[in-house]
Amino acid sequence: MLEILKPGLLTTPQDRGRTGYTHLGVGHAGAFDEPAFRLANALAGNPSDACALELTLLGPTLKFHADAWIALTGAPASARVDGHALPMWSPSLVRKESVLILGALAQGCRSYLAVHGGFDFEPVLGSRSLDVNAALGPLGRPLRAGDVLKIGETGSGSFLPESLRIPALPQSHEPDPILKWSIDPRPWFEPDHEIPLRLLPGTHAALLDAESRAALHAQVFRVGADSNRVGCRLEGAPLALTTSLDLISEGCVAGTVQLPPSGQPIALGAEHPVSGGYPRIGQIARADLPLLAQRRPGDALRFVPCMLDEAQQALRERERQIREMETIIAKRLFQQGA
Amino acid sequence: MDFTAEPLSEDSLLLRFGATIDPAINARVHAAAARMRAAQLPGITEIAPAYASLLLCFEQGSGSFFEKESGSFRRAVESILAAVSGQNEPDPFSGREIDIPVCYGGAHGPDLVDIAQHAGLDVYQVIERHAAREYMVAMLGFAPGFPYLLGLDRALHTPRRLTPRTRVPAGSVAIGGSQTGIYPRELPGGWMLIGRTPLALFDPQRDPPCLLAPGDRVRFRAIDAGEFIAMRESPQ
């Protein structure tokens, strides 16, 4: 068990999201930075869909009521266990009665804390992801001080990657419980905001006036203060369409860039509404959604045009890289345990 | 049935059957959705109707619709789409008929008087007209289980409130422009509140979680405050 002493700014249980209920108005939710989330699980010896915690800008303080293997990935966070620095992107053993203090994120917006066995919430509509606005999923709200989180069964086999085993927990007399290896945060965390997000043309992109069409790819947007898991507000010189459209609501997906009447685009995030009626001026390539997830209010954001083939290839390549890394991590954990 | 198909992203496709809120177009969307569901293709994760469009989402990876090597899956989807487009008339698709009890006016429908005033009717006529129609669940959205219902009597079309309420009680039946809808839980909202149903529209512990599905037909039935309490206390 694990107890929340301080909740941080916005700490939510997330897995890979809720699938198959869009037609009932139930959104997907799920971890916003999917690769960082999956690698946190891999490092904690979990299957890739185990429930982890998504931290936002300021992390929580947690007390462990049992020994646990944990892993922290995503945006660089200050992390201390009983005063000792906790390395990120690495599996670590945390002892019973230890207190883990996750502080402010130095840069980026979201980090992921996975624990071996996963956070054991009752799935709601097939997922342990919290949909904040729908108040759906674990506890129906973000974590608060005093919440006690159960950790899932470890070593039961059913919760481990196929054909791989997790090392048994070392006994408490283990001299140095922290393993001496970690994975390189690159390319999984990109601190350089000059790196543009690839943008597919949206349904109504051709209706942008000439100036706006140029500005969409030329200007540097600022991520607005009221950005969240639903969407990132992009502030810049307002964009305009050549004609006013009277659109009716249709389905939306993560990464859709909408243009509300203000002329300031909104890039939809992990907790995007299931439908919307604003013009769509672009679609962020899925492989670049982690870049969106990691821009915090005030950060710069730029787009570069991209076509569907290229975006698909980028997505395939990223998936290949994640799987390769998951395999490498699993092998290492296995060797460690042998 | 004519439609256009546009990829929204690497793993989703939007089929558009029109550009207006029109019951005939919406019926085509539900017919196409029913066909797609009936085919039970394993690579499809979402089949989500809206007023005039149908969103299809595909599994990532080797089975993805757009992957070159996934020819058989793509052909399966395309053959369904071809069957839909080859039809002159939509399938005689018919959703379920669902009866929804509503306690109109009073504390449950604080805007009933304003709706009546706007319509130039008395409140009893408004209730009678609202309960007389059969509505189509065009789509669910805004919040889990919130149905957008088509078929509202033209006389009852009422603009949304200038200042939305911060809290609309769960079960509130409301009018927003040309549509009527039901708030599945307490939410902020700008629609005009005409009454309230004791039924739970959305319960994630229930299977299916929603009382209504896209394409269902809905009728409202007036109940009094006593029945409202009785039904709330002993839900079926």
Image (cartoon, rainbow, N blue to C red):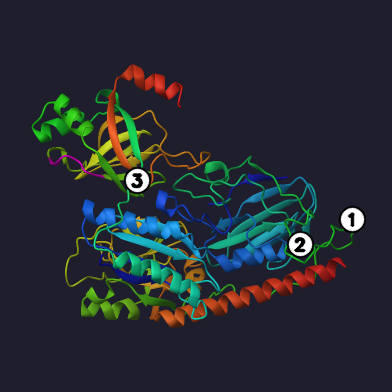
**Dot in front, 3 or 1:** 3
Q: Is residue A230 visible?
A: no
Subunit of label 1: A
Quadrant (top left, top right, bottom left, bottom right) of the N terminus of chain A: top right
Examine the structure image and report whether residue A32 is included in the region drawn in magenta: no
Q: Is residue B3 visible?
A: yes
Position of A293 with respect to B132 (left or right) is: right
| Disc 3 element | loop
At horizontal 71% and vertical 73% (from top left) the residue drawn is A327
Labels 3 & 1 near each other (Cβ < 8 A): no
- Number of callouts in the render? 3
Mark 1: give few (<14), some (14-19) or many (20+) Cα within 10 Å: few
Is the magenta region chiefly helix, strand or loop?
loop
Residues marked 3 and 1, same chain = no
Q: Which residue is mark 2?
A: A92
Examine the structure image and report whether residue B153 is included in the region drawn in magenta: yes
Residues marked 1 and 2, same chain = yes
| Disc 1 element | loop
Residue range corresponding to the magenta coloring:
B150-154
Q: Which residue is mark 3?
A: B95
Based on the displayed image, in which of its 4 quarters is residue B48 positioned?
A: bottom left
Q: What is the x, y in percent for residue B149?
A: 28, 44
Q: What is the x, y in percent for residue A39?
A: 65, 67
Q: Tell me the tag on residue B23.
A: none
How far is disc 3 from disc 1 in space, using C-alphas?
60 Å
Amino acid marked by disc 1: Gln
